[in-house]
């Protein structure tokens, strides 16, 4: 089984992945780690802020990794911001049977009401360091785009509207 957890920054992808690792004991790949490995090693001139270009770079690699995991009858959780919303188009039907994907999305109202909490819990699993680029406006813009793309491409998503409840049972089952 391959579990993909996508969504915008600060939505709890890494937290959900950690909970799934603890429950299922699957391996986990954080796409931010792959991104930073490529940047720090000099394999790309992209920066951590080149999100769209980073998706274009990472997705073909991740897509083939997913196929290999399925072909080897293994399990993995992959989490990050770098999944295209049309991800299903990259796989034949046989592969899709073994892939579960969910995008985590905050509503505009949730962000406006809970922005300080979102920032406060941003480093609950990983240390974010300087987090000044994460503004209310950026979160609203990115989450609205993610929701729009999920609807356009028929992606499964979990919309946080009132209370933050990202639990294994609610997400993956």
Image (cartoon, grey):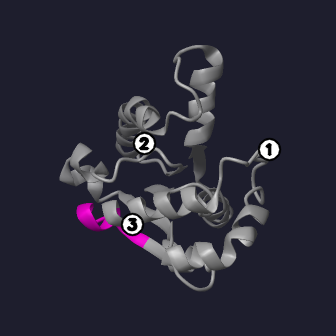
Query: Is residue 40 something that shows in the picture?
Result: yes
Q: Is residue 62 above or below residue 39?
A: below
**Neighbour tally class for label 1: few under 14, some 14-19, many 20 plus, Cα within 10 Å:** few
Q: Residue furthest bottom?
A: 162
State the CA–CA distance, disc 3 to disc 1.
27 Å
Cα separation between marks 2 and 1: 32 Å
Earlier along the polypeptide chain: callout 3 or callout 1?
Answer: 1
Front residue of this view, candidates 82 and 17:
82
Which type of secondary structure does the marked residue at label 2 adopt?
Answer: helix
Determine if residue 167 is in view. no
Which residue is tagged 3?
147
Please state which of the two labelled residues, at mark 3 or mark 2, is closer to the viewer: 3
Q: In which image quadrant can residue 144 be found?
A: bottom left
Q: Which residue is mark 1?
A: 129
Instruction: Tell me the residue at 25%/61% (across/down).
Output: 153
Who's the residue at 64% across and 67% down the image?
23
| Front in this rendered view, residue 55 or 139 | 139
Eye-nearest disc, 2 or 1: 1
In this picture, residue 67 sits left or right of residue 163: left
Expressed as whole percent of the image width and height from the top left, the position of residue 13 reads 58, 59
Q: Which element type, helix, strand or loop, lies under badge 3?
A: helix
Mark earlier in primary sequence (2, 1): 2
Q: What residue sits right under mark 2 in the picture?
A: 69
Kindly check if marks 2 and 1 are in contact, taking CB atoms under 8 A apart as contact: no
Task: Pick the residue in front: 114 or 16.
Answer: 114
**Boundaries of the magenta span:** 150-157
| Dot 3 crowding, Cα within 10 Å, few <14, some 14–19, many 20+ | many
Q: CA distance from mark 3 to mark 2?
A: 28 Å
Residue 92 is left or right of residue 29, and the answer is: left
Q: Position of residue 170 (x, y in %)?
A: 52, 80
Q: Residue furthest front?
A: 137
């Amino acid at each position: 089984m391959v579990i993909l957890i996508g969504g915008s920054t600060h939505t709890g992808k890494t937290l959900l992945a950690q909970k799934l690792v603890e429950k299922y004991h699957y391996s986990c790949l954080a796409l931010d780690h792959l991104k930073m490995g490529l940047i720090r090693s000099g394999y790309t001139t992209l920066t951590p802020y080149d999100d769209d270009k980073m998706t274009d770079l990472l997705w073909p690699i991740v897509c083939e990794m997913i196929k290999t995991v399925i072909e080897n009858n293994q399990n993995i959780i992959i989490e990050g911001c770098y999944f295209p919303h049309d991800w299903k188009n990259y796989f034949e039907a046989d592969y899709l049977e073994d892939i579960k994907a969910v995008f985590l999305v905050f509503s505009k109202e949730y962000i406006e009401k809970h922005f300080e909490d979102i920032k406060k819990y941003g480093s609950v699993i990983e240390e974010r360091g300087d987090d000044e680029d994460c503004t209310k406006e950026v979160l609203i813009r990115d989450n609205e785009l993610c929701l729009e793309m999920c609807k356009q491409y028929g992606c499964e998503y979990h919309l946080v509207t009132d209370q933050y409840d990202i639990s294994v049972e609610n997400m993956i089952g």
